[in-house]
Image (cartoon, grey):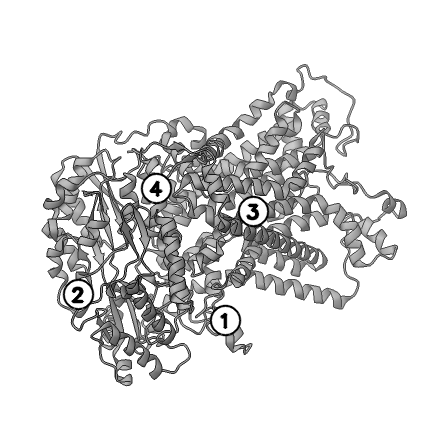
Amino acid sequence: MSAAVPPAVAVPPAARGARPAPRPRRRVRPRTRAARWLLGGLAVVVALVWAFPIYWMVSSAFLPTARLQRPEPTFVPVDGTLANFRQVLTDESFYASFRVSLAVTAITLAGAVLFAFVAALAISRFRFRGRKSFIVTILVVQMIPAEGLFISQYAVLDGWGLVNSVLGLSIVYVAAILPFTVWMLRGFVNGVPLELEEAAMVDGLSRTRAFFRITFPLLAPGLVASGVYGFLQAWNEYTLALVVMTEPGERTLPLWLQGLVEANRATDWGVVMAGSTLIAVPVIGFFLLVQKRMSAGLVAGAVKG
Amino acid sequence: MRRVRTGGLAAAAVASLLAVSACGGGSTAEASGDTEVRLWLNGTDTPQELRDYLVETFEADHEGMTLVIEEQDWSGLVPRLQTALASEDQTPDLVEIGNTQSPTFTYAGAFSDLSDMYDELGGDDLLPGFVEAGTVDDTLYAVPYYSGARAVFYRKDLFEQAGVAVPQTLAEFRTAAIALQQANPAQDFSGFWFPGQDWYNGIAWLFTGGGELAVQEGDRWVGALSSPESQAALTEVQDLFTNATRAPRDADSNEPWVAFNNGQAAMFSAPTWARWSIALPECDKGVDPDDTSPEAEALLAEQQACNEERTGVFPLPGAQPGTPATVFAGGSNIAVPTMSQHQEEARDLLRIIYSEEFQTMLAENGLIPGNSQYAGALGDDPYAQAALAAAVDAKLTPAAERWADVEGARILEDFFQQIASGTDVAQAAAEADRLLEETLN
Amino acid sequence: MAAPPLPPETAAPPRDPAPPGPAPAPPRRVPRRAPWRARLNPYLLLVPALVPIAVGLGYPLVRQFLLSFQEYGLAQQFGRPAEWVGLRNYTELLSDPYVWGVIGRSVAFCLVNAGLTMAVGVGLAVLMSKVGRAARITLQVGMLLAWGTPVLATLTVWQWLFDSQYGVVNWVLAGPLGLAEFRGHSWIIEPASFYLVATVIVVWMSVPFVVFTTYAALLQVPAECVEAAQLDGAGAWQRFRHLSVPLIKPVLLIAALLQVIWDLRVFTQIHVLQKAGAPTRETHLLGTYVYSLSREFSMAGAMATVMLVLTLCLTGFYIRRMLREEEL
């Protein structure tokens, strides 16, 4: 959807001349009923194939580890147990890590979205020296492998006493996510005609109100889309968190999960899968919550290249 | 306290974002005036009881100080040490480190000199291989914490069926493994569970046959896999891979009991704590994992007894009858980081660790203590005896500065996998020697 | 660009077309102050983004770059002075045929994976736009699950699925499908089949992004055009090829660019599969190779620079074009 751009989408002149469309938003569907059923069936099959590993994770969470290590796979855990979930949910460190992850993700999200937003405003609403270099820089920065960076990143945080701190980890995450989000949001800001805002101001709204009443809502999908991206990154990141968060009370969920793998000398895989499932729930929840606006968001932003 | 508190709620977190200066600023240690000494222990090998003992004893001796034990995961330890040990604020004051990882950090200058404590901590009773791993140029930087020896577990009934007795020499072990596999024609059955990347177990043959992984010649390390002794041992290893095991070539030494529990292996070699992971189907009492009633616990005890009754254990035998094989000693060292601001306190803590009480407690928990004088406390059950026998002559990987790089590059995993895949032993060894030299020098 | 872009591509704030908002009423009050954007300094707006990027990414990247001309390892971290060695790290790396092998494999892996991801992703997006509501939502949820679940968990599951002894894949192939040779088959021990498994996993993880992006783009293809083309007798493929593709091209290009960037530095999937028991040296790609050098920070830095150059070569065409269009 031109979420950002009202349907000013240009129509190829030839097509426009041929026949004005009565219903602008109708989807064109395959003609025959059989074809539709066939395609529908195909879609469902693909969906099942795609979701299968996730199903396997959830189903394993209901089985004792010994069952997971039998030669015969258990496809449906009919006689499953809730013991794995109970063990995770009675583990205090799970909640501690949950809080840390939540805090890191919230700060990262807020920081990345807010900072990217104003940066995007700058590069799409202003023409200034260095603008192009900035755009190139944020693109190039994404191309450098980050696996070897943790030593220097750690040194920076350590110099400021930000190791083992939610804020410190968040700063590095914000830095890692910003290039992508600036790039994405730039497209959205580009897409909102300035005249809309100016017209509203002319109408008597103050400039702040004009911005929040007119421009901001049009940017919401973009903000949401960047948010989802940031959420996924911050919630799942492991390598950096590993070195930055070393104190047991400051570990994020992926670190907690790795700890769970090693919690017993023989890994209790059923519990690990229960833990994984529980970690995934907030992500899926957040995702479902915003998904509708998101697919609109990703595209309109991306288009701007 | 150094750490920045985490805002519990998202809102609080966002608010704290706006207060960067408030959070970021004062991060000097012990702002509260309370001296905190930090000890890093890895994994769960050190039982809670021992941790409590350390904290209590240390704090009783040191008025106004707290000992904080932070548990680290083995898998993420090296990156954490790479960063934290170089930071004055973040470094632990005493750190446990895997014995094969310790030369890398010792050479880098990460640890303080402990030479003057050598005699005090146990002198020549300290596990010699571990001391060597912690020594650079006759200076001692890291001392042995504990060693976890390996033993071979076997199914008594399958031994009986195949007419195989507990082997007395390494050669007999190979014959027994092959006989067991032949006696059990099932397609997935292994006489000895020996997955392709399991170099931990594989190098026992190398060491027992007098071979080495790498040797130091002057300033250089030279790969020793092509030496005649090594070649002879590796040929035996290849025979085991070919005729005595059907374990996947793409598996390592992790969870060797799984196939055993599924009736697909007659023997496996593992740390002695693996006894708790053995769960033979015929002993399964079907206890609901949710059930914590006394009856259930009684059933579980019965189940464990049944498993142990059917499972035998022996140390991998050596070249001559009555001698144990020279196995690879897994375990860890302990060291005081150079950057630690509490050198004296850390040394005091070391003294507690090497006290008779603590060493005895380690042994009582099935770990071979760093001071072998106290290994007697391991007990006299067959597991303890097997562990002790194996530990007497155990050996470590070369104490080379860059040994951790060899493990990082997984050179030995690749090498043993090639042997398991039937690559010519001499050829594989030549290539691995080349890589070892490239990495170690 | 030949085709009319969907939201105006080179969007300078469009000046003349009347915004479809409320018709501007005659000015009642002329704002006394200058318009806000004239008073806001753009550099000021960039500061909040630049600060974390500079601190968290910029400085470490510069340091990494500088280290790549030094000899800097673990010992230097503990105070041994670092020595400047000029280009030695680079020449050492680039004179090693093994490194070139890794580079070649990585580029091939990247192109195959990016290509497959795009093909499958676009295909599924088209499918998504052609099916009914129920099927569409099912497909969306399936994609969503794959995208949103923590990587640590999904990779463990994939490892289980392809486990040689107890993996479901082998179990299904050898049991119900009767292909007995797959009993105990090692998927990751041969580099070729290792990369096959890696490709399955990487594509599985990356396709959802492409699907959601492309699907949204397809929604913007005006139905009237499609109907018109249909009336003109264009077949489904022709309609897609000549109508939809040009319209969604900007989206496809940017998605492809991101795939190339991400797949060239793929790390986690390869690393996990290697640890699952693959022959490490034969399966290194650039991402895992850099990581394996990370105790030799200077070497890893040099390799990272090489990777940057490589990525720029692969994507240079697109970036140049983008910059041209940026000229406003």
Residue B356: x, y in percent?
10, 51
Residue B385: x, y in percent?
16, 67
Q: Counting other residues with Cα less than 10 Å from the Cα at mark 1, is it few (<14), some (14-19), or many (20 or more)?
A: many
Q: Counting other residues with Cα less than 10 Å from the Cα at mark 3, is it few (<14), some (14-19), or many (20 or more)?
A: some
Observer-nearest of A123 and B155: B155
- Whether discs 2 and 3 lie on one chain: the answer is no
Amino acid type shown at disc 2: Ala
Residue drawn at x 33%, y 66% is B234
Q: Is residue A21 left or right of residue A76?
A: right
Give the chain letter at badge 4. B
Foreground: disc 1 or disc 2: 2
Which quadrant holds residue C2?
top right
Q: Which mark is residue C262?
A: 3
Residue B70: x, y in percent?
28, 45
Q: Secondary structure at mark 4?
A: helix
- Whether discs 1 and 3 lie on one chain: the answer is yes
Amino acid type shown at disc 4: Gln
In primary-sequence order, the first of circles 4 and 2 is 4
Amino acid type shown at disc 3: Trp
- Whether discs 1 and 2 lie on one chain: the answer is no
Foreground: disc 2 or disc 3: 2
Q: Which residue is mark 1?
A: C170
Distance (Cα) linking label 4 and label 1:
40 Å
Does the residue at mark 4 contact the one at mark 1 (Cβ under 8 Å)? no
Q: Residue furthest top?
A: C32
Which quadrant holds residue B324?
bottom left
Foreground: disc 4 or disc 1: 4
Distance (Cα) linking label 2 and label 3:
52 Å
Does the residue at mark 3 contact the one at mark 4 (Cβ under 8 Å)? no
